[in-house]
């Protein structure tokens, strides 16, 4: 098992969220979107350079900014 940021995951790679780094406001915002530790996520893709990252979390498809995705730590196999 390896822990990396969501931004570093490859397209179609699955993982489990282990940590939400950042301030209380960011954690609250992510949790309101259904992104919290213990939840499984699949990275759908990303745009070039530091563009938005698209993930599937449960039944939702969510686009996150690159900086926000860097603060989400994911455990992959």
Image: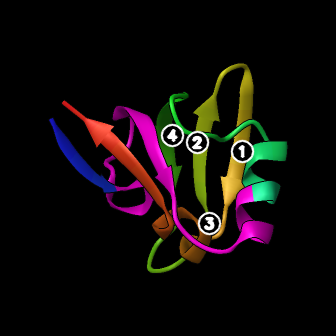
Return the disc, 4 or 2, that comes first in the chain's sequence: 4
Q: Residues within 10 Å of mark 1 (few under 14, many from 20)?
A: some
Mark 1 lies on residue: 62
Mark 2 lies on residue: 55
Is the residue under label 1 in contact with that under label 2 (CB below 8 Å)? yes
* Residue 23 picture location, percent across and down: 67, 74
Helix, strand or loop at disc 3?
loop
Q: Residues within 10 Å of mark 4 (few under 14, many from 20)?
A: some
Is the residue under label 3 in contact with that under label 4 (CB below 8 Å)? no
Is the residue under label 2 in contact with that under label 4 (CB below 8 Å)? yes
Mark 4 lies on residue: 44
Mark 3 lies on residue: 52
* Magenta residues (range): 5-27
Q: CA distance from mark 4 to mark 3?
A: 11 Å
Q: CA distance from mark 3 to mark 2?
A: 10 Å
Q: Left or right: where does residue 1 sit relative to residue 36?
A: left
Is 23 contained in the magenta span?
yes
Return the disc, 4 or 3, that comes first in the chain's sequence: 4
């Amino acid at each position: 098992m390896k822990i990396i940021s969501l931004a570093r995951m490859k397209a179609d790679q699955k993982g489990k969220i282990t940590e939400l780094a950042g301030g209380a406001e960011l954690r609250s915002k992510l949790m309101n979107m259904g992104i919290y530790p213990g939840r499984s996520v699949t990275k759908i893709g990303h745009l070039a350079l530091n563009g938005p990252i698209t993930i599937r979390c449960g039944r939702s498809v969510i686009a996150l900014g690159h900086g926000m995705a860097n603060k989400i730590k994911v455990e992959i196999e």
